[in-house]
Image: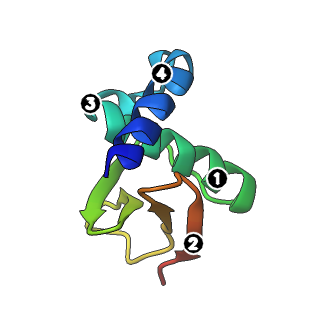
Amino acid sequence: MRSNLSFVSFLILALAPMCSNASSSCAGLPGTQRVVAETAKNYILRTYPDFKADDLCLQVTDSQDKWEVTYRLPSNRLGGAPVVLVDKQTGNVLRSYRTQ
C-alpha cells in the first residue's frame, strides 16, 4: 500500500506542471484523478486520432484496482467514446476500447 501511495505522489509531482496547463476537461478533477485523466487523454490522442473531444467532459471512475477514464457524451450521441483503463499501482494503461 505504501508503494502505491509513493507512486501516486510521484505522478502528481512529476506531472503537475503538465496539468497546470490542462484543458478544461481536467481542470475540475482532484489531484490524482487529474493526473490519471491527463495520462488517459494523451493516450487517446495518440491511439484514437479521429476522436474529437471538443466540449466533452472527462469522467474518471474508481474501479477497485484501476481507474476507468472516458468522456461524458451528450444525450443525442449514442457512442464512440474511448474508454481507457489505467492501473492504480503502476499508472500504465492496461487496455482501451471504444464504445459503439
**Mark 1 or 3 closer to N-term?**
3
Where on the picture, by quarter, is residue 98? bottom right
Depth check, mark 3 against mark 4: the one in front is: 4
Nearer to me, 66 or 58: 66
Q: Amino acid at mark 3?
A: Gly
User: Are circles 1 and 2 on residues that touch, CB within 8 Å?
Assistant: yes
**Pointer 1 local density, CA inside 10 Å: few below 14, some 14–19, many at least 20:** some
**Pointer 3 local density, CA inside 10 Å: few below 14, some 14–19, many at least 20:** few
Depth check, mark 4 against mark 1: the one in front is: 4
Nearer to me, 65 or 50: 65
Give the residue at x 62% y 58%.
Answer: 51
> Which residue has dot 2 on it?
96
Q: Looking at the rendered structure, which numbered label has been put on residue 13?
A: 4
**Mark 2 or 3 closer to N-term?**
3
Give the residue at x 49% y 43%.
Answer: 54
> Which residue has dot 3 on it?
28
